[in-house]
Image (spheres, grey):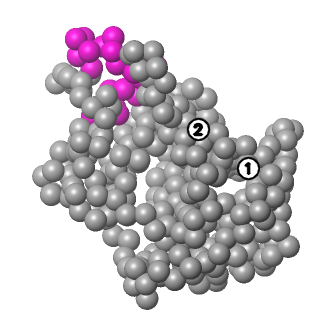
Amino acid sequence: MKRIEKITILKNNKIDKEEYLKRLDTKYIKNGIEKSFKEQYLKAEGNELDYKFFSPISSSRLCFELFSFLANDENIIDIEFEYYLPGLKSVHGYNVPAPNMDVYFEDDDIHFIETKFTEISYNKKEDISKNYYEYYLDGNNNIDKSVLDICNIRFDGNLIFAKYFIKLVNDILNYAEEKELLSNKDWFNLKQEITHIFGIGQYIYKYKPTKNIKFTNLIYLFDNGISKLAYKFRSLVVNMMNKYINELGLNVLFFYDFMYMQNYIETIDLNKEAYASNRKISDILKEFMLEV
């Protein structure tokens, strides 16, 4: 079945908003702290609980069903949805929207997950803020003295990450232009991924993790999931992040991968009850036309 056909069917689904609000407001405890998924969604930048979450084709709601059951798993140290990562700082004193990760959880590793359900992107260079990359680097890829002060503000004093990140964004934009990959229909959202990598890089600097960091894009397989831009970006990011982590003196690794939701589902015990529900995970996922 083609993507457009599936979306047409999905849009006819009726969502029980009241039931979801009860489930979202069911408290859980991690690290000795009582938490609420509802509070996490309410704090998110995108006003998720106003309308997005309750759309029949909501990637946020699908993500909730794919991961919320982990809150009941004693092997999971922590889990949160719409997890705030550090954002770019403004030189004018106002707040710059921070990147939100769909879900963060911690077990033996630190996981950041971004879900792609029905979203389609048409990546454009002008969508990427110049504040991320338009700085002069010298021949050794070090930040030129003329822009050192402004970089110090925008990257919150983390000039080690700044020199790597500025080169990364310039490299991927140059590649995308050279290969004529911009403005093409794509599941991969370059602007969003750049903000997420920025956030993870600053998270590493702030918290100095002692566990490996794994960032995964979970993709709903409609027609095909091949994206030349995505795979090139991943290659550049993995190389950059591990050099950066090494320069920070941390003994951890960074992993960045793309996984089809269908493959991820094979790792779940589908007979478990969904979070704060008497229904099985498998029954709920069928409503998203996922083969379980």
Residue range highlighted in magenta: 143-167
Residue receiving disc 2? 84
Image quadrant for the C terminus?
A: bottom right
Q: Residue at left 76%, top 57%?
A: 21
> Is residue 12 in the magenta section?
no
What residue type is disc 1 on? Phe
Q: Are marks 1 and 2 in contact (CB under 8 Å)?
A: no
Choose between 14 and 173: the one closer to the eye. Answer: 14
Q: Residue at x 32, y 64 (%)?
A: 186
Residues packed near mark 1 inside 10 Å, few (<14), some (14 to 19) or many (20 plus): many
Dot 1 falls on a residue whose secondary structure is: helix
Residue plotted at (32% across, 47% down)? 236
The 10 Å Cα crowd at callout 2, few under 14, some 14 to 19, many 20 or more, is many
Q: Position of residue 181 (x, y in %)?
A: 20, 58
Callout 2, which amino acid?
Tyr
Q: Is residue 210 positioned above or below 216 on the image?
A: above
43, 192: nearer the viewer: 43
